[in-house]
Image (cartoon, coloured by chain):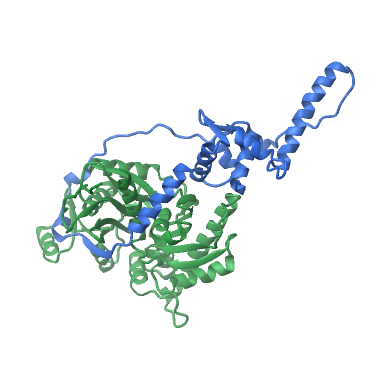
Amino acid sequence: MKKKKVPEIEGLKGEIQKGKGVDIGTMFVKCAVKEGDEIVFRSQRDAFFEVEHTDFTRKILDNSKVKYIIKDDKLYVVGDEALQFANMFNKETRRPLSKGVISPTEKEALPMIELLVKNVVGEPTYKGEVVYFSVPGEPLDAEFNIVYHIKMLEGFLKTLGYAPKAIHEGHAVVLSELAEEDFTGIGLSFGGGMVNACLSFMSVPIFKFSVAKAGDWIDQQVAMAVDETASRISSIKESSLDLSKEGALSKVESALSIYYNHLIEYTIENVKQEFTKAKRMPRMDKPISIILSGGTSLPKGFAHRFKHILDQLKLPVPVGSVRMATQPLRSVAKGALIAASADEGKK
Amino acid sequence: MLSGTETDILNSVVRLRQASRNQIRREIGFSLEYIGFVCRYLTRKGYLVFSDGYYSLAKEGIKTLLQDEDPKIDKKLIKQIADEVAKEISGELKKTVKGLKIPVREIRAPQGKKDEETREAVKIKTDFEFPIEDETSVLKSNIGKVGINTEKEKSDIESKVKLFRNIQNKGMKR
């Protein structure tokens, strides 16, 4: 059958193929679209910071190409610059998402996340275009569920003209990275608000869950330990943390290293418990691979640290390769795009 | 030749007489999706029948479980069935030989387990759809003007999409 040509959309050149994948995370919103023989990722950090609203401030922000949003009489700097502003004023950024879901305590959460999603995802190429959006698994260690979050995002994407479908973050990582293993293995996404884990067998999720300790938790714990703001710790973590460094660690580096260890061990123990709960596993002929992804997995030496702790704790199944995703910040959006493209192909 | 998990599912269905996906999941473990995946395959192959949300054993399933050379039915289940037969026979005997007591082991599930079996997880079947207001219409922003961060990479997803679709299709056909 001859493929229908789809028109170009704003910001993208060439033939846009149908189907989109969106990673809606606590730190970033990222959308993956296939354009010709390339994948285009459009992303936005989902953090904002209120600054004084005057014409003068607005002009300066416009001239310096700093993104902002105005609601009523309030002016909010959005994105990476929000983090810089927060550090400058020694305050915390505000976030529309908290622990992987729409923040219940942030009154501007809904319009903010809607605007960010709208900007990143854009208009559908046709009404009813399939978009897969990432969602966390049910949290094992927190008293909230994810239904409200999923329904609100699904409803908003429908309002934009899409046919939205939810995909678990860990499952998206498996689709993106484990094709050579027939989509069998464990996908771990170490995000800002949550760690998501999914064991998949032949592309079917066997178990999937989330834990509410992740990058933000590390920032908050370290901030309390060394009397700094969490935003500043987050900046240090993202810019210069090296987990393979063995000596001459600063106070912040030592605290980060301690809490990284804690987070990795906590995640592995929870994966082990899920294996136990599942009683029996499908027969897997080969040792399973584990993929590490997400912003919190970015510091140098993370995979090595993970392997070291895994060797000590051991999973109840043989483990083969433990490796970083090829692009740890893109794998969720890419996995969602694979699912969307497969769905579009069926139409 | 059935796999271990497939045989476990058949045994579980025999034990429960009729079983929903959820009940099988509770007995065997695994996710609902995976149990559904295997059950669909067993139904297609004639091992199970599916009606009104419940699976029960079909002809092929009975044949497989009772194969002489390699009986797949588990020992616990054989014992349970034998107990039930014994109870039935003893009932008949009691009628004919009044006063003669035949000891029969009572089949009683542990209290916790019994509760668990009867307590079916509530599955939400309705959907509450409502129009979500586009709250962004009241916001002013320069994001469109400044532009969104864009990165590109060479696509390697074609073969992955194809493989994913093939595996899914096989799952449906299995």
Q: Quadrant of residue A55?
A: bottom left
Whole-percent x and y of residue A247? 47, 82
- In the displayed structure, A119 sits above or below A245; it is above
Q: Which residue lies furthest to the bottom in this view?
A: A248
Is A285 displayed left or right of A218 in the figure? right
Q: Which of A10 and B132 is in front in this view?
A: A10
Whole-percent x and y of residue A309? 54, 69
Is B100 displayed left or right of A4 in the figure? right
Whole-percent x and y of residue B172? 45, 42
Q: Which of A246 and A52 is in front in this view?
A: A246
Residue drawn 84% across and 20% down?
B94
Residue drawn 32% across and 62% down?
B156
Q: Nearer the viewer, residue A305 or A90?
A: A305
Whole-percent x and y of residue B58? 59, 32
- In the displayed structure, A151 sits above or below A324; it is above
Is A84 displayed left or right of A62 in the figure? right
- Tell me the quarter of the image containing the C terminus of chain A: top left
Which chain comes out blue in the rendered image? B
Residue B81 visible at all: yes
Q: Which of A290 and B113 is in front in this view?
A: A290
| Count of all numbered marks drawn on residues in the image | 0
Which chain comes out green in the rendered image? A
Residue A99 visible at all: no
